[in-house]
Image: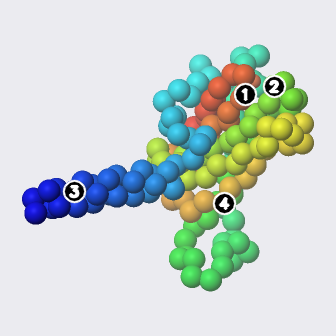
Amino acid sequence: MQNIIRRSFVKSALASAVVVAVGSSLHRSALAADEFLDVKFAKDPRNLQAGLETAHTPSMTVEKVDSKGVAYGKTPAGDFYRVSVQARHEATKEHHIYGIALYLNGELVAEHTMNQARAEASLPAVSFVQRLKTGDDLLAVSICNLHGKWGNRATV
Ligand SMILES: [Fe+2]
């Protein structure tokens, strides 16, 4: 009897572990799997140095949008902003940006990936529409196949 209870407990524990593992992969992406601890930043984002900093540091613009043009159904009301992110980086098979991620107050909220098999098809320029408020901290990250992750911050 005790053996059956123990087996049942082990099965439940394993099932819970699987649910936790699946659950965590649902809200984390492949791009952000190792979070943003390895992101490189320009020494002075307002005065980028020629070379790696200029080519990889994403620029970010934030503008308020009329949410009625975007929101649908039961989307709660709020202040929405278009966050446009771009890097001035080459797009070749050998060297390209394949992802851009956006973090809000330290949490991944959106990302865009490019097909690396067609690296020349996309330029690293995307926009996201986000619910934001004054004081929110934005971090944009561009991911280069050769030079890794590069970030830039903005405060709303
Ligand atoms: Fe690069």
Query: Disc 4 marks which residue?
Result: 129
- The kind of residue tagged 3 is Arg
Q: Quadrant of residue 89?
A: top right
Query: Disc 2 marks which residue?
Result: 95
Question: Would residue 84 be visible to someone looking at this image?
Answer: no
**Residue farthest to the bottom?**
73
Gap in angstroms between the C-alphas marked 2 and 3: 52 Å
**Foreground of the two, 154 or 130:** 130
Q: Using a 10 Å C-alpha cutoff, classify the residue at mark 2 as few (fewer than 14 neighbours), some (14 to 19) or many (20 or more).
A: some
Gap in angstroms between the C-alphas marked 1 and 4: 26 Å
**Foreground of the two, 49 or 124:** 124
Earlier sequence position, callout 4 versus callout 2? 2
Gap in angstroms between the C-alphas marked 4 and 2: 28 Å
- Rendered location of residue 105, percent (x, y): 47, 47
- The kind of residue tagged 2 is His
- Rendered location of residue 138, percent (x, y): 55, 45
